[in-house]
Each structure stands twice: as C-alpha cells, then as structure tokens.
Image (cartoon, rainbow, N blue to C red):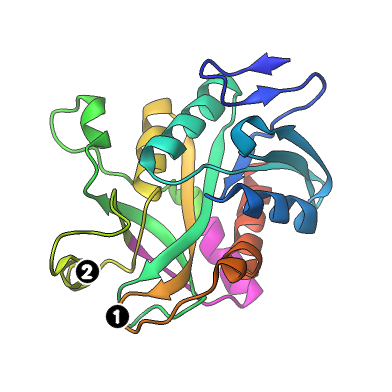
Amino acid sequence: MKESISASIRLPEGAEIAKVVLMPGDPLRAKHVAEKYLENPVCFNTVRNMLGYTGTYKGRKISVMGSGMGIPSIGLYATELYNQFDVNAIIRIGSAGGLCDAVKLRDVVIAMGASSNSAYNASYDMPGYLAPVADYGMLANAAEAAKKLGVNAVVGKVFTSDHFYNPSAGCNEKLRDLGHLAVEMEVAGLYWTAAGCGKKALGILTISDHLFTGEFLSAEDRQNSFHDMMEVALETAWHEAE
C-alpha cells in the first residue's frame, strides 16, 4: 500500500498510476471515462470517493482521476500525482461557461493559457506574475487530434475563477472583451502546479453553458456526453504515453 502525504490518494498493492492522467473535476466522470474508453480499467483510489482508474487505450497505459472543484483541490491532487507518484503529464477534462460568439454549446476549448483572479500564484514567490500556460507539445497534439476527429475545437485563453457566482458586476463582459473564450475553475491552478513541479499540463474543456445566450446542459449531460472532449484528450494522452 502506497499512500500520499495528505492521505488523499491510497494505492493498493499491485495497483499503479500511469505517467499520463486525465483529470475531470467530477469523480463520476472519471468512472465513466474508465468504463467507456479504457481496456481493463482497475480502480486505484477511492479515498473521499475521488475515484481513480488505470487502464490501457490503444495499447498504452493511461489513468483517469477526479480532481474536485477549484484550484486548491486540483492543486493538491496534481502536486501529489506529479511529485509522489511520478506522473509526467495531467490533462484536465472539464466543463466551462462560454463567454464569446466563437464558442457554442458542446464546443471544445483547448486552453492555451489562463487568466485568473486566484491568489494561488503568489505562493511561487516570483518577482512578477507566473504565467499559467499549457505545454505546447500537448496543445499541438490536441489541436491535431481534434482536426483528425472532426471536432469543433477552439484554441485560446480561458479565465480560471475562484468564484462560481462572481459578485463583480460586469465581470463576464470584461472577460469577453479581453478575448477569453470561457470561464472555469481549475486550469490556471493546474498550469501553475505543473510549472512548479517541472511537469506538463493541458486543459481541454467542453462548453456546458453560455453566459450570454443562457443555454446550458443538464448535470447528466455534463457527466456522460462530453465524448468529443474525451476522445481528443485520450488521443493527446496516447502521444504522451509513448
């Protein structure tokens, strides 16, 4: 039995975590991905019901595990996966709210970079602002995978918010006007964590609602219907698992 320092990840004897991990926020989405896409998936974590599985995809070992909601949660799990379980790359697969006309409901967004209102960045004690950006090789592979799969994917910057309900009036309009494609709650934290650990990260998102049109998907749709995003992420992970 191998257990993380925080006791948030407990790896049973004989279980393993792959070098590449897909991370949805919802642990039930992790279960769905494992059961639908991975061959012979084995559950390696059940602590706090943050389900994690390892299996194979097209012959290469890949893991999928929930991250929970918000930067502190994904920062904890990503740090432990990178530093204590020798993971090389993490791909966030999650939902996001659309901010501009360039993205529609169910479109895939590949996050090149992420602005944020989080103070998490201050912990790195850098003489300036540590820019949260994706690993370029993973981003390029994801864009190419989307093209080959015929998936409508938009590459650009997103906004990672510490607020699901932002109290700042006019915030969404300002984010849209500054060129953000969508708003979500984890990507910047993952990118900062990857930079701090010297590892790789990428965020691939599905537009689950649009903040200006009012369209939205149900909770069940969010859990079970993000197949385009999942397939792009799996193809990207497959390249990293070489």
Direction right: furthest residue: 40
Pick whichever, 23 or 136, lies toward us.
Answer: 23
In reply to whether residue 154 is colored magenta, the answer given is: yes
- At label 1, which amino acid type do we have? Phe
Residue range (magenta):
140-157
Residues at discs 2 and 1 in contact (Cβ within 8 Å): yes
- At label 2, which amino acid type do we have? Asn
- Return the mark for residue 172: 2
Pick whichever, 143 or 121, lies toward us.
Answer: 121
Above or below for 59 versus 224 = above
In reply to whether residue 211 is colored magenta, the answer given is: no
Q: Position of residue 47 (x, y in %)?
A: 63, 30
Residue 235 falls in which quadrant of the image?
A: bottom right
Q: Secondary structure at mark 1?
A: loop
Name the residue that disc number 1 marks: 212
Give the Cα distance between marks 2 and 1. Answer: 9 Å
